[in-house]
Amino acid sequence: MSSSDAPSNATGGAGPVSARVRVRRHADRGRYDAATVEAILDAALICHVGVVEDGQPLVLPTGFGRAGRTLYLHGAVANRSLRLALEGVCVTVTLLDGLVLARSVFTHSMNYRSVVVRGRARPVTDPAEKLAALRAITEHLVPGRWAEVRTPSPTELAATAVIALDMEECSAKVRSGPPRDEAPDRSLPVWAGEVPLHLVAGSPRRDEHVSTGIAEPPSVAATRGRFAAPGGEAGGA
Amino acid sequence: MSSSDAPSNATGGAGPVSARVRVRRHADRGRYDAATVEAILDAALICHVGVVEDGQPLVLPTGFGRAGRTLYLHGAVANRSLRLALEGVCVTVTLLDGLVLARSVFTHSMNYRSVVVRGRARPVTDPAEKLAALRAITEHLVPGRWAEVRTPSPTELAATAVIALDMEECSAKVRSGPPRDEAPDRSLPVWAGEVPLHLVAGSPRRDEHVSTGIAEPPSVAATRGRFAAPGGEAGGA
């Protein structure tokens, strides 16, 4: 690929995408625009964080937050992944949208939206940025929740480590639509198609110690709406 | 922790769990029995595969299969993650079960079940094992599907790489239940509790080229049942 037709960088810059995050397999599924990358990140509840420990990979799931072109991760101050992420980290987010059932084993697939962000994290030590990062992480999980609850105490802040990863090297990969069987297979007498998958919220379970006089707050209503079952699409019948 | 009270190995062996996979943060959430680990793996549709590339971590999502105490991954023969996994790999699977809303920011959490498997993969070159591995991967995604569709041709088999990872070093981590606020916070006038999350299948979308005379097969019915909306729990209302 010549530099003139290289995909534009997700940062919006003029440079080509880093080879470290360019989509290689099924290159047509690569997406490099900031809007696509950020929408996938914002729709995901968790990420998988990869680091290198004693020369070997370690991948753990965790929550995260985003503020502009920066991702934030947090954990206990002793957290090894956060410490190792300063030497190099890969944050991967995946939304599974459905199963793709083809006529042949070989063409079975999944519909998904994923993002990979690579780089070296930096520790967040400035008190204002640290608090803003924790707010971004909380609001990412449950929008509106920060204003409803007790914010972190100095002791809690001191027990929490926060790191930041700039989204300089990132890409998205998206598959959607029906199976793509080769022409000779298309006449096989086999059902083929998609089974959509959705993350759906069940009825909230009130903690037993919460007074019945306390109403369900706006953040919970918003979460129900965010993860509502799609109309007429609930499976199982 | 002395060796006498070390958790038993998920292999069922008498030895202690490798320090590389022992759960450190929230150690009470660690699970090391084979039944728990295998149930989590079998319930998950995708894993996140971590490898080391030029000294830096790379994490990508993919499908997988399990046969006994072996995980199988596949991809195109040029797939870099599969090649790098021979030098060291971490396969992580996460099932997100719900959001845990506490009275304080600090105690917010998620309910989840996760598994981490670490080791070095080996290439699967024996034709019988390779075919069995592809069957395990297909059946993991959609049980019953293998018998319904065209199986791989010699050309397709030659284009596919398969690797195996023995589950010698693995552990699970599980959180469930309500928020665990400290006693002084429990009297705050704040709603707290859990919002359960479920992966739910929508109505299957038949590929436009499938003859209307072809009925939905058992594998699709089974998938609808596997990802059915829990009774009376659908959110959004």
Image: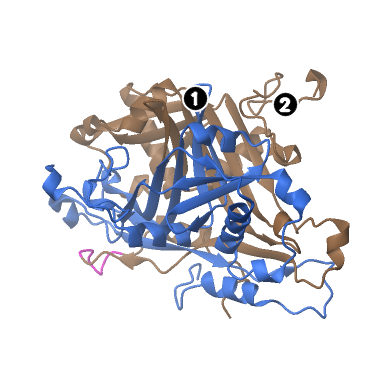
Chain colours: A blue, B brown
Residue A150 appears at what percent x and percent y? 75, 64
Residue where numbered disc 2 is placed: B8
Q: Residues within 10 Å of mark 1 (few under 14, many from 20)?
A: many
Task: Residue type at mark 2: give it.
Answer: Ser
- Majority secondary structure of the magenta segment? loop
Mark carried by residue A233 = none
Image vertical order of residue B139 relative to residue B164, above or below? below
Task: Residue type at mark 1: give it.
Answer: Gln
What's the CA distance linking mark 2 and mark 1? Answer: 24 Å
Q: Is residue B210 magenta?
A: yes
Instruction: Decide if residue A165 is on the left or right side of residue A141.
Output: left
Subunit of mark 2? B
> Is residue B168 visible in the rendered structure shown here?
yes
Mark 2 or 1, closer to the camera: 1
Residue at x-position 70% and y-position 71%: A148
Q: Secondary structure at mark 2?
A: loop
Residue B34 appears at what percent x and percent y? 64, 33
Q: Nearer the viewer, residue A85 or B226?
A: A85
Task: Look at the image and give the residue range highlighted in magenta.
Answer: B209-214
Residue where numbered disc 1 is placed: A56
Instruction: Decide if residue A76 is on the left or right side of residue B62.
Output: right
Q: Nearer the viewer, residue B80 or A233?
A: B80
Subunit of mark 1? A
Q: Is residue B116 magenta?
A: no
Image vertical order of residue B1 relative to residue B176, above or below? above
> Is residue B234 visible in the rendered structure shown here?
no
Q: Nearer the viewer, residue B149 or B171?
A: B171
